[in-house]
């Protein structure tokens, strides 16, 4: 059912220590399949972060340039504890992996194309489109 690098979310709480638990809905990626799929090593993701000028991580939101989700832990889970992430989340994760490999010029082209698609999707007759500004 699950494959290597599938995006998943936790279906139930996962307690990893006396004072640390991952809540249902925590996103992750399968990084290893154990046995014949009886268990999985899953990289679980935490909050959005960005590196500042000093190389320190600071909190961010998904729209912050250069933002990424911190790895919160890599844990062993059973198949009944996870479910596939929704299709759109899988696409978002795939795009993020690709975007992280692109040159600055190509990032600008992707940004322009994404803005074009957004405006196309939200266009209504007689209504001006919102402009994005950084």
Image (spheres, helix red, strand yellow):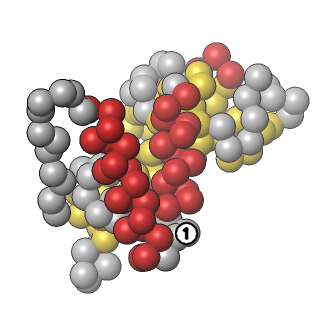
Q: Is residue 47 visible?
A: no
Q: Residue furthest right?
A: 36
Q: Nearer the viewer, residue 112 or 18?
A: 112
Q: Residue at x 47, y 70 (%)?
A: 106
From this view, report whether residue 25 is shown above or below residue 17. above
Horizontal placement of 77 versus 70: left or right?
Answer: right
Q: Residue at x 81, y 29 (%)?
A: 37
Q: Is residue 37 visible?
A: yes
Residue 19 rendering spot, x and y as whole percentages: 35, 37
From this view, report whether residue 76 is shown above or below residue 80. below
Residue under numbered circle 1: 101
Q: Identify the image quadrant of residue 24.
A: top left
Residue 71 rendering spot, x and y as whole percentages: 46, 53
Label 1 sits on a secondary structure element that is: loop
Horizontal placement of 125 versus 22: left or right?
Answer: left
Horizontal placement of 125 versus 79: left or right?
Answer: left
Quarter of the figure that contains the N terminus? top right
Q: Residue furthest front?
A: 126
Q: Nearer the viewer, residue 122 or 36?
A: 122
Residue 28 rendering spot, x and y as whole percentages: 53, 39
Quarter of the figure that contains the C terminus? bottom left
**What is the crowding at mark 1: few (fewer than 14 residues within 10 Å), some, or many (at least 20)?**
few
Horizontal placement of 95 versus 35: left or right?
Answer: left
Residue 38 rendering spot, x and y as whole percentages: 79, 25
């Amino acid at each position: 059912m699950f494959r290597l690098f599938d995006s998943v979310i936790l279906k139930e709480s996962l307690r990893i220590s006396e004072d640390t638990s991952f809540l249902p809905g925590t996103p992750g990626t399968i990084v290893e399949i154990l046995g014949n799929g009886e268990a999985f090593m899953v990289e679980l993701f935490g909050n959005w972060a960005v590196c500042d000028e000093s190389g320190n991580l600071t909190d961010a939101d998904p729209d912050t340039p250069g933002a990424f989700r911190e790895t919160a832990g890599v844990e062993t889970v059973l198949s009944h504890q996870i479910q596939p992430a929704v299709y759109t989340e899988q696409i978002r994760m795939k795009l993020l992996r690709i975007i992280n490999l692109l040159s600055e010029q190509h990032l600008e082209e992707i940004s322009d194309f994404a803005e074009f698609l957004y405006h196309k999707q939200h266009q209504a007759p007689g209504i001006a489109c919102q402009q994005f500004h950084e």
